[in-house]
Amino acid sequence: MKAKTGAVCCLLLHSVTAACDSTLPPEPLNPDRTVLVALYEATDGATWANSDGWLSDRPIGEWHGVHVSGGRVVRLDLPYNYIAGPIPPELGDLTRLERLNLRFNNFSGPIPPELGKLAGLKFLDFFDNNLTGPIPLELGNLDSLERLSLDPWNCVPQALLDWLGGRSHNAVLCVTSSSS
């Protein structure tokens, strides 16, 4: 009987010692945090109109414009935030993203084709930015997409228009002309 009691005490003591040991590996990073950091760094987040909470130790759901469910980013709403620079391709790794609203900013360059990996994306808004190049055909992989809002810059490939027209449910493509 004493041998069993000693073994239990030894296990308990080991658990307490391990909990106090600072050499244990850190808890794995949320992969969405890594993507958000890439967005912040690619666009000089310190210059945004509102970057409250970004790069802090606070949960990412407390970062300005970031909405989470189950610890994963489901909405990224950063309109009117004076964000400038390229849209980082890493945004395609936000696997639970349903809404991406980047309207009225100063994003430049092409739309990354990696955004075509966002299978659950329902709402995509790039209106009033400085994006260039054609809309990537990979956006045709977005089977859940209900609304795509863009400026009338460059072209919407015919294959993407065909894809929108062949949808089993309504999908809205908003290409709006800004009045000068």
Image: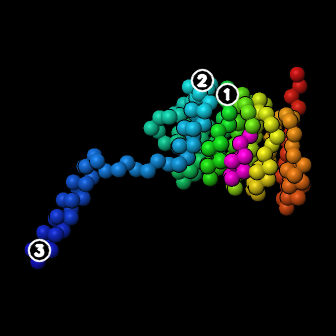
- The image shows residue 95, relative to residue 179, as above or below, that is below
Q: Earlier in the sequence, mark 2 or mark 1?
A: 2
- Using the rendered image of the protein, determine whether residue 146 is visible from the camera's viewpoint: no
The residue depicted at 69 percent of the width and 47 percent of the height is 114
Looking at the picture, which amino acid does disc 1 mark? Ala
Q: Which quadrant does the C terminus fall into?
A: top right
Picture coordinates of residue 106, whole percent (x, y): 72, 28
Looking at the picture, which amino acid does disc 3 mark? Ala
* Marks 3/1: CA–CA distance: 67 Å
User: Looking at the image, which is closer to me, 118 or 100?
Assistant: 118
The residue depicted at 57 percent of the width and 32 percent of the height is 41
Q: Quadrant of residue 18?
A: bottom left
Q: Residues within 10 Å of mark 3 (few under 14, many from 20)?
A: few
Picture coordinates of residue 86, whole percent (x, y): 68, 33
- The image shows residue 49, relative to residue 142, as above or below, that is above
Spot the residue most to the bottom: 1
- The image shows residue 166, relative to residue 175, as above or below, that is below
Number of marks in the image?
Answer: 3
The boundaries of the magenta stretch are 111-118
The residue depicted at 58 percent of the width and 29 percent of the height is 45
- Residue 3's label in the rendered image is 3
- For disc 2, the marked residue is 47
Q: Which quadrant does the N terminus fall into?
A: bottom left
* Marks 2/1: CA–CA distance: 9 Å
